[in-house]
Image (cartoon, rainbow, N blue to C red):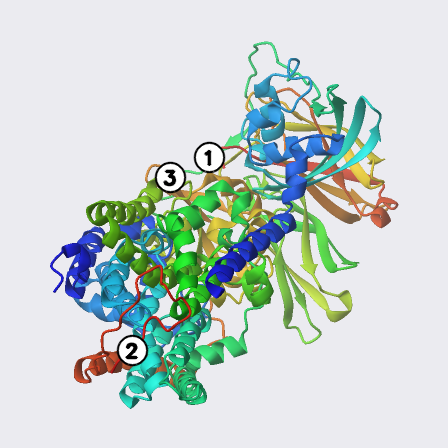
Amino acid sequence: METSYFRRPIPLAAIILLALAVHGPLLVMQLPLNTSYDANFHIFFASHYAQHWFDPWNGKWFAGFSQTTYPPLGHQWIAIFSYVVGLKMAYMLVQLIALLLLPVGVYRFARLWVDERASSYAALFSIFLGVVGFLVYSAGQLSTMLSAPLYLLALPYFYDWSRNGEGRALLKGVILTLAAASVHHVTLLFGSMLFAMPVLWLACLDRKEGRSVFPVIARAGVFAVLAGIGVGIVLLPYWIAIIRHPIEQMPIPHASRSNLLMNMTYFINYFVVPYGALILALPFILWFGSSNRRLRPLLLAFWFAFLFGLGGTTPVPKWILGRAFDILTFERFTLWAALLALPIVGLLAEVMLDRYQRVAAVGLSLAAVGSLTLSLGWLVWSPFHTLGGMKVDSVVEFLNRNGHDRYRYLTLGFGNSLPKISTYSDASSVDGEYNSARLLPEMTHYGSAQLTSSKYFGTAGMESLRAMLKHANYYGLKYIFVHDPYYEPLLAFAGWRQIESYDPDSITVWSKEDVPPARKFESDAMPAPWEGLLWGILPLASSILAILFALLLPDRRRATESVVEFPAASSEGVLAGEAR
Amino acid sequence: MMKRVLPIVLAVATVVFIWIAWVQSGGIERHRMFSARSPEEAVRLLLTAAKSRNWDAAYSRLANAGEVEKAAFARDLGGSNGSLRTYATLENFNVWGLHADNQEATVRAKLHYSTAVGPLDDVRDIKVRNDGSGTWKVVWPTSKVPKLAPQVIPVNYLRWDVINRGAEDDWGVQNVDSPQVRIVSMNALQRPDRVVILGEIVNEDTVPAYVNVNAALLAPDGSPVAQETSFDKISHTLLPKQVSPYRIDFPGMKLQQIKSVRMDAKAMLVPATADPVIAVTQQRMETDALGKKVLRGELLNQSGQIVNIPHVVASYYDANGKVIWVSDGYLDQELLPQIPVAFAVDLPDDVAGKVQTYHVVVNYYQKNNS
């Protein structure tokens, strides 16, 4: 029996506790609220579910939009927890659950490819991934972070079912897929392929000796069909919304789509910070991944995800995605690339620890902690800063008094604190932070994102803002809150007058007196009542079923696998076989 | 075999993909531009630095840096005194050569700015000089900002204050009658891509008025087809008896679709002042270098305060005194006291032939005084 700590797997429970110790305090401090771009957005969506569980039509943005355009599960869980701990802590709690599930998912996914020890290292490293720090504390991509571990947890079942035909694995795998899809659609549409294809390839490689590959593929097909039907039903209102109003608006520029080599700041933001010390491991990932026949599907999936994560630095994403390239953002592909690389990195760590023990342990620890630290430090050093932590109490108070909520409002220069105002005020805005749900022509025709950040989109942004201001009377847009004096000349020339200022003059309120009260607009994007019912029941049910299955249907234990030490003497053989 | 081939294939493919994207993103042109081996590349290099507001880098591309102060150069490109140029970002530019020999060249640059009030285009002819080593550098025009002698400018213009507002009342909740304003003329025109409603509005009251003009196009059944406002094509603050032109655009509409127009002028009592007075002088119709008809003139700020962003709204009349067009334009330069600044606003060629007279009003934005 191996007695050295350096040659034993790290218990999963210890890894989860470490994840709690690392990320728990940061979330208790509510760091993402002040530093991330999307935390307020998710809280806004959740606040709507907390008040209108079965009515996904939200009148507070874009003069009304449907929340069925974004899978609801993460937001619904925030809404549920908010009844106990409030919206902000509920967000932190759901984010923490995602961060605790991540090492579990990585461990179980890695076990398909490498031995228990390497898998435990992979799980350990997942806590410290730079891209995790980047997505949680800078981007605030809750849905990406929550859906990824759910898919990772589903993949071993997909493997077990495809390879061995275990009915229980099919059931648990499909229900986990439904839960993951209910959290995030982009992960479902793009990420799942990157993970599922190599696992299917592996199941084919690992099929019982002498058996044909077709039953494996057929069973995978059954899984895909059942998952497809399930996702079709669970997210039916989403599909209806997307078919009724496909995303045809002008593409909105995003830095992750640019050629990172042309801009050093983007390069650091989208490559150096998210990958961190993994950059040093890239040659070894290539080498180890190529040397082992079972790891090659994983390596290829990693390579594709890596290329996609580079955005416009290679033409590959544009070639493959076509128009979808201009809709997606690509930092999530970096997460998937890192997760796909982790089993190989675990193997690398295993080899290093075997050879150099303490030195390797110190080096790997520093590299891991350094990666997360860099992503947290980048929150301060980055030239991009969010306004999520801005004080907006005075704005909320203004909108909630003296019938001001009878009119619509607009914020200018508020960045991602707009959802915070929307969450706590009763009034409705013509602006909003979710580009895919926008249907107003003043916004969709110009190729800019939020009106509150118009100036950052140059002529397109300012023309979009002008178009909206020209139609202020039509939309009942009376009040404009300005946190950036840049916008004041336009308002002055367009007929608004400053009426108040707050926090000494950092926020000014502008009004136009001939604007009639806002009226409700009928829209064909409004979901039918039965859609609201489905939306309120099925996604949450899928997650509850997944939890019940995890508790009540124990997994069959997969026998320990062995991976031949690297470099392998015979590279073409099956290096990691499964014994049952 | 695969063990050795696969990493090489993946690594090489990655490098090739990155190279393709680098070329597609203009990497080669960018690399070439940094050598400034042609007059156009020298201008591009300077404007690229100006685009990122890197004045040091832009200044280092000047052939006559000894004659141009860096601060003046930065002011020239980036604006000063809260002018519209200070609210502008150079978004893109086109350059093309007009004339070149071995030593000197002239390059025309069309600059497209995004500004706080909308897009702004500027055309500059830039001289470029070969420094003898094959590298071209820009000869920046030396312009001296005129400085006035210290003087006292008395302010004795009328001012109207409003004192009946409660602290908690919104603007407009004043319990007083609205000022009497009247639309004195209205003309509906069909332009190639839109219907245009234009005319003039007058404040007939003895107090200042803050006006907005709205128009609705009505279908034969009386239902509104489209509604728009004068937006920034009007002078919103009208002193007693003051007249302002207005223009309301309806993009994509046809006159044949509508039966009538419903006009609506809203007026509010507001505090106002006649200061600063901005005189309009030297007005004349001309054809500019690109062959377009323009109304040129000069603005003279007669007060002692800086006007940050001037806005010119011009109305044009035919032989019968009817308003036949209204055009406007923002000046990217501030109005310093007593120093004239040129302006030009364009008008359609087909309208220009019918113009007999014109009238210019000047709107303005002053920081901290909106």
Seen at 79% across and 38% down, the residue is: B294
Q: Say which of B43 and B2 sits in front.
A: B2
Q: Which of the two marks, 2 or 3, is nearer to us in this view?
A: 2
Residue B312 in view in this figure: no
Residue A124 in view in this figure: yes
Q: Say which of A50 and A184 sits in front.
A: A184
Q: Which residue is mark 3?
A: A506
Distance, label 3 to label 1, CA atoms, is 25 Å
Task: Give the residue type that dot 3 points to.
Answer: Ser
Q: Say which of A97 and A204 sits in front.
A: A204
For disc 1, the chain is: B
Is B149 situated above or below B31?
above
Dot 2 and dot 3 residues touching (CB under 8 Å): no
Quadrant containing the N terminus of chain A is: bottom left
Seen at 74% across and 70% down, the residue is: B257
Distance, label 2 to label 1, CA atoms, is 88 Å
Task: Give the residue type that dot 2 points to.
Answer: Glu
Task: Give the residue type that dot 1 points to.
Answer: Asp
Is A216 situated above or below A40?
below
Secondary element under disc 1, as helix, strand or loop, is: loop
Q: Does residue B5 appear left or right of residue B94 in this picture? A: left
Q: Which of the two marks, 2 or 1, is nearer to us in this view?
A: 2
Q: Which residue is mark 1?
A: B161
Distance, label 2 to label 3, CA atoms, is 65 Å
For disc 2, the chain is: A
Is A62 situated above or below B142?
below
Q: Which residue is mark 2?
A: A578
Give residue A51's position: percent from left, percent from top: 29, 71
